[in-house]
Image (cartoon, grey):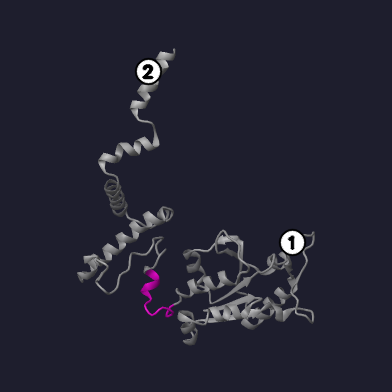
Amino acid sequence: MNFYVMTLFPQMVEDGCSASILGRAQEKGLLHVEAVNIRDYAQNKHNRVDDYPYGGGAGMVMQAAPVYEAWKDLTQRIGKQPRVVFLTPQGKTFCQRMAEDLAKEEDLILLCGHYEGIDERVLEMIVTDEVSAGDFVLTGGELPAMMMIDCISRLVPGVLNNDMSAEEESFSGNLLEYPQYTRPEVFHDRKVPEILLSGHHGKIDQWRREQSILRTAKKRPDLLETAELTPKERKWLKDQLEQETKRQVPADDSRKLCESCEEPKEADAEKEKKFEKDA
């Protein structure tokens, strides 16, 4: 898969994508990550690519021409016009399902903004998708672009040594990943769950599936709305949560919890007596 990052800071992208799994995948020819320097397409001797915004306001805006010329030259080299993803807080929040969709592309262009943004006219001309890393503001789109490249690349066949890893990780099936353990078997009196030492792969798979469901319910319950659970699994989850609630709230403390939410009945009785007396 080929990633083309249109940016004002190419070294930042190149350095970030040259190590670890991404670096090895590029060496094997499984990935190609190219940073396209928008400044190279500036139309002035100082390589200036920004200017003051029309209408006034703080900051500078990236000009349309350098961005357009960079895109035009890039698409001519590629031989087609791939999807162009503009990294912006105004876009749809990036998620695993979006990564799975983008991983189907052979070529993908990521456009990184900077300063106060990019001239709207060129965005209207070349952008096909707007994507956000989350509800916060960054200096530029380079970090979100690298985050997307990392996530999408893991779905490209051969990038991971074990292709099953991508299928079993967090957000696969809209569930978080199950707990992981390695040697030693006992660490600070904490033991590895016995089931993982049993060698019974069927039971281990079932345990991992159940732990994924339970962990999602506790940490990201919002994901369960679209998680792929069977009726049997949903019943199991309900029973587990009820049991944990009972373990966490002893019977003797149940009245205390009620008192923290509302006044006890004794207080209501005292209020009634006082009301009758005042009357």
The image position of residue 216, as x and y in percent, is 38, 57
Q: CA distance from mark 1 to mark 2?
A: 66 Å
Could you say which disc has been placed on residue 58 in the image? 1
The quadrant in which residue 213 appears is bottom left
Image x and y of residue 180, in percent: 32, 68
Residue located 47% across and 64% down the image = 97
Q: Do the numbered discs 1 and 2 sit on residues whose CB atoms are within 8 Å?
A: no
For this rendering, which residue is in front, 268 or 48?
A: 268
Provide the secondary structure element on which disc 1 rests: loop
Q: Which residues are magenta?
A: 157-167
Q: Is residue 243 magenta?
A: no
Q: Tell me the number on the disc at residue 273.
A: 2
Q: Residues within 10 Å of mark 2 (few under 14, many from 20)?
A: few
Circle number at residue 112? none
Dot 2: element: helix
Question: As shown in the figure, which amino acid type bears the numbered disc 1?
Answer: Ala
**Height in image: 177 above or below 38?**
above
Judging depth in this view, the residue of 167 and 146 nearest the camera is: 146
